Image (tube, rainbow, N blue to C red):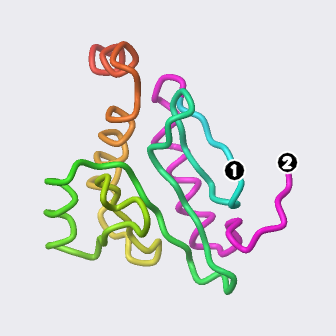
Amino acid sequence: MAFESEHVLVSEIALAVRDRIRAITRGLPEAEEKIDGFGHTTFKVRDKSFVMMGEGEKGEGGSLSFKSDKETQQLLIQKGPYYRTAYIGQHGWVSINCKEIEDWNELSELIVEAYLRAAPKRLAQAYRNK
């Protein structure tokens, strides 16, 4: 499926981050990667998004957004370089510019938590019981 959109990932940085996200989500039951109607690379579980990636027209590295709760969102924003996601931040979503990702262990944990927030209870429980 090809999209003519300025949001499709093109920079080396964004593509490398996407590949690392793929590796993190590979072990999550029923997690899948899709390109949404806006050209964002989206990771979903049963049609519920838990990670989204997008990149502007200039291909400057893009950003990564993930589902969180409001407490975690506030803590991450306070410590930086995370920021509240535009349009969906009121639901706890947090973003980071791909160029600013330094702690992949922390980000991996946050992505798994995002998956567990989006996944149906049975899938989340199956993952926790692994």
Query: Does the segment drawn in magenta span residue 4?
Result: yes
Which quarter of the figure has residue 100?
bottom left
Of residues 4 and 100, the one nearer the viewer is 4
- Dot 1 falls on a residue whose secondary structure is strand
Q: Residue furthest bottom?
A: 58
Disc number placed over residue 35 in the picture, else none: 1
Q: Where residue 96 appears, x then y in whole percent?
A: 38, 70
Find disc 2 in the rendering and name its residue.
1
Please, is residue 32 above or below residue 103 in the view?
A: above
For the C terminus, give its image quadrant. top left
Disc number placed over residue 117 in the picture, else none: none
Which quarter of the figure has residue 126?
top left
Q: Amino acid at mark 1?
A: Ile
| Image marks 2 and 1: residues in contact by CB distance under 8 Å | yes
Magenta region, residue range: 1-30
Q: Amino acid at mark 2?
A: Met
- Dot 2 falls on a residue whose secondary structure is loop
Residue beneath the point at 61% across and 73% down: 55
Residue beneath the point at 77% across and 69% down: 5
Query: Does the segment drawn in magenta span residue 110?
Result: no
The 10 Å Cα crowd at callout 2, few under 14, some 14 to 19, many 20 or more, is: few
Q: Where residue 106 appears, x then y in whole percent?
A: 26, 54
Residue beneath the point at 53% across and 31% down: 31
Q: Where residue 88 appears, x then y in whole percent?
A: 40, 59
Q: For the residues marked 2 and 1, what is the alpha-carbon distance in whole angstroms?
A: 8 Å
Which quarter of the figure has residue 78?
bottom left
Residue beneath the point at 57% across and 57% down: 18
